[in-house]
Image (spheres, grey):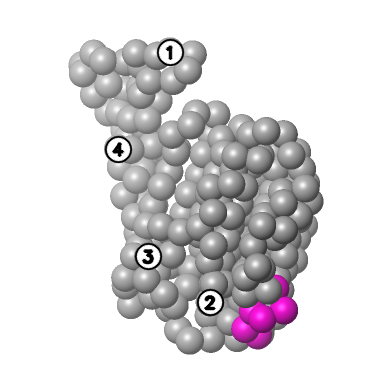
Amino acid sequence: MTWSIIAIDDASGQIGIAVATRFFAVGARVPHIAAGFGAVATQALVNPYYGIDGTRLLREGKSPNEIIRALLAADSGRESRQLHVMDVRGRIAAHTGSDCVDWCGHISGVGFSIAGNMLADAQVLDETAKAYVANATLPFPRRLIAAMQAGEAAGGDKRGKQSAALLIHGEEEWSALDLRVDDHSDPLAELARLEHVSRERWVHFRQFLPTRQNPAGTTDRAVIDAGIAAATAGGK
């Protein structure tokens, strides 16, 4: 009922997931990221514990193949599930159960993994991949959205569209960007609008938040405001 892309940005080292579907609030259940370790996307008849347990196993140092084997072994409903896993080393593994609805499948390339089910046809994933590769000069969030928009133009979810999400993590446990469109007539267009809004203040503000290296962050509001003003004046 969904397709998603997991990718690692070579420039920043960030890992991100973009996802879209004809179902409510896809961002609440599909994308899971363990900062510094990797990501899991759990879809079709979604098993939320694939994300919860999968990210735990990533933190424990398990490989994507080991993670998928462990998750499937514990789930008698595995043939109704789809998931893909990518770690920060770029290793990828995927599972599409035999009971997933056509079209369903998985493709991957250098630095990205794409999986989907209940799609118009295989071109959805192919065009998502082509657009991701072709837009290497775009900033990472816009590159992920552009890839999903190409997949939608190729047919997307064969039932239509309703929700989309974008989740990106850098070095910290908190997300660098976490955008959700839970119920919308054109969710990827709305996701692109929200990403644009995030560049007005959020992407400039987040550098002042607490980090593991700087547990207090920056609390001087004058410094924060000046930093945001300088960044936005430069059109960043």
Q: In which quarter of the image is residue 210?
A: top left
Question: Which callout, 4 or 3, points to the residue nearer the camera?
Answer: 3
**Which amino acid type is marked by label 3?**
Ala
Q: In this view, does 195 lie to the left or right of 212?
A: left
Residue bearing mark 3? 25
- The residue lying toward the viewer, choosing from 184 and 37, is 37
Residue 177 seen: yes
Q: Which of marks 1 and 3 is in front?
A: 3
Q: How far apart are marks 1 and 4 (CA)?
A: 21 Å
- The label shown at residue 1 is 2
Q: What element carries label 1?
A: loop
Q: Which quadrant does the C terminus fall into?
A: top left
Measured in 3D between alpha carbons, the distance from the residue under mark 2 to the one under mark 4, in whole angstroms, is 34 Å
User: Between disc 3 and disc 2, whose residue precedes?
Assistant: 2
Q: Are marks 2 and 1 in contact (CB under 8 Å)?
A: no
Determine the residue positioned at 37% across, 57% down: 180
Query: What residue sits right under mark 4 in the picture?
Result: 201
Q: Would residue 214 appear left or right of 87 to someone viewing this image?
A: left
Which residue has dot 1 on it?
A: 214
* Badge 1: residue crowd in 10 Å (few <14, some 14–19, many ≥20): few
Q: Which of 75 and 184 lies nearest the eye of the viewer?
A: 75
Residue farthest along the left direction in this orientation: 222
Residue 177 on image: x %, y %: 43, 43
